[in-house]
């Protein structure tokens, strides 16, 4: 059964199918729609803490992860410092492995470091969908107020000291000039985080291309904050701004980030996994529970194992489970074997359809934005020179604002 046919009818509106090609080989895949992910992130903006946001991200398909540049940009703009803290704590797990084991990780600090150093606020800001919903500041059709609206959107980020300080702490852990392929993200419990270097990266990299007047305001805000913080006994900035921890239950959930379906922490089989016809599987006994990580996992239960679970549990998966990354368990009513391949997430290929900030779309949006800005600038000059009757005439000719 192909993956697109596995998705349960109750969830189909949240997914799309795509085809990847590699020479003579082609493969059909499915992915969750970016609109579903964006709407979920928007609905939970300012409601989720670090752990809730992390759990949700770990439940998503591979294209939406802490290591995907496109998804990092999206979460950064919606959840701001909450995501920055979650990103910091999750990347620190990689850094700890590299620090203690002196080896690279599957998502190397080198790749992560390059991704973070390559982030540019202006590029992300100018292409961010749903900016009105994020900031709570709607557009205005009156072009005279357009600049005011844009300034308010910018202020939502550039005047948020928690956003700025969290970014500095995140960047202070980076060491892009390091000669080693790994060790490019400093481990905060075994290395010294360089706050001044983090601030330098903030202004020279992240805010590269941002107007000087905004940089001066941000720098003044940061300096005033640092001066105020000198009054505190605890002057360890990364502990002030990164004072949250990933809870133990999240550590358990993170071990299941590669799975759509996972076994209970209490699962035990004296036989362990077994193989039949080259298929690895786990024996599940009557009364054992299995965990459902996401809508794909729920769909796999319906497609392959629905006869082994109660109607009540199946109804819960369709009608009651929120799919916010929460751990949900269902209990089997009779013994069966669950295939390992049905439990694992699909990591076959990069689906660029899920990218919000694709290069082509970015260029298209930037060109359109520049065209609108140039037109508005021209109209403003005409109004200043000839009076408001020019505006009325242009409106009659249906010139877009």
Image: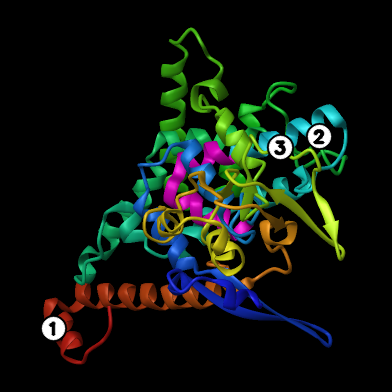
Dot 3 or dot 2, earlier in sequence? 2
Asked if residue 70 is among those painted magenta in the image, a careful observer would answer yes
Asked if residue 308 can be seen in this view, the reply is yes
Q: Which residue is mark 2?
A: 98
Q: Which residues are magenta?
A: 69-87
- Above or below — where is 151 with respect to 346? above
User: What x and y, as percent, mark residue 194?
Assistant: 66, 27
Point 59% across, 60% down: residue: 70
Secondary element under disc 2, as helix, strand or loop, is helix
- The residue identified by callout 3 is 268
- Is 147 located above or below residue 48 in the figure? below
**Gap between marks 1 and 2, in whole Å?**
65 Å
Residue at coordinates 66% horizontally, 51% vertically from top-left?
67
Q: How far apart are the two marked residues, 1 and 3, measured between alpha carbons?
A: 77 Å
Residue 143 vertical position relative to residue 208 in the rendered view, above or below = below
Q: Nearer the viewer, mark 1 or mark 2?
A: 2
Q: Is residue 89 visible?
A: no
Q: Residue at x 57, y 58 (%)?
A: 308
């Amino acid at each position: 059964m192909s993956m697109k046919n596995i998705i349960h009818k109750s969830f189909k509106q949240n997914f799309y199918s795509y085809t990847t090609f590699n020479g003579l080989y082609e493969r059909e895949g499915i992915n969750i729609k970016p609109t579903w992910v964006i709407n979920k992130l928007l609905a939970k903006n300012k409601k989720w803490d670090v752990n809730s946001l992390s759990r949700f991200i770990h439940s998503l398909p591979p294209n939406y992860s802490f290591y995907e540049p496109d998804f990092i940009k999206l979460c950064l703009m919606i959840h701001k410092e909450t995501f920055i803290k979650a990103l910091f704590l999750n990347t620190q797990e990689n850094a700890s492995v590299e620090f203690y084991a002196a080896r690279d990780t599957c998502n190397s600090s080198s790749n992560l470091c390059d991704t973070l150093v390559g982030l540019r606020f202006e590029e992300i800001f100018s292409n961010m969908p749903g900016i009105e919903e994020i900031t709570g500041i709607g557009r205005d059709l009156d072009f005279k107020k357009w600049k005011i609206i844009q300034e308010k959107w910018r202020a939502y980020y550039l005047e948020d000291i928690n956003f700025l300080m969290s970014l500095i702490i995140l960047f202070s852990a980076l060491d892009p000039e390091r000669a080693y392929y790994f060790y490019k993200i400093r481990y905060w419990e075994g290395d010294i985080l360089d706050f001044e270097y983090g601030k330098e990266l903030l202004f020279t990299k992240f805010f590269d291309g941002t107007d000087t007047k905004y940089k001066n305001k941000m720098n003044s805000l940061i300096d005033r904050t640092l001066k105020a913080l000198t009054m505190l006994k605890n002057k360890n900035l990364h502990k002030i701004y990164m004072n949250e921890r990933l809870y133990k239950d999240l550590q358990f959930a993170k071990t299941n980030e590669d799975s759509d379906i996972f076994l209970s922490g209490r699962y035990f089989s004296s036989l362990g996994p077994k193989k039949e016809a080259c298929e690895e599987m786990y024996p599940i006994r009557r009364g054992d529970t299995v965990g459902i990580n996401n809508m794909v996992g729920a769909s796999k239960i319906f497609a392959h194992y629905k006869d082994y679970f109660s109607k009540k549990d199946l109804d819960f998966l369709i009608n009651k489970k929120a799919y916010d990354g929460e751990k949900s368990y269902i209990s089997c009513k009779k013994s069966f074997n669950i295939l390992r391949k049905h439990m694992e997430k699909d990591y076959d290929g990069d689906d660029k359809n899920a990218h919000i900030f694709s290069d082509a779309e970015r260029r298209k949006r930037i060109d359109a934005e520049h065209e609108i800005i140039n037109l508005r600038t021209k109209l403003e000059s005409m109004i200043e020179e000839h009076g408001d009757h020019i505006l009325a005439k242009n409106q009659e000719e249906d010139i877009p604002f």
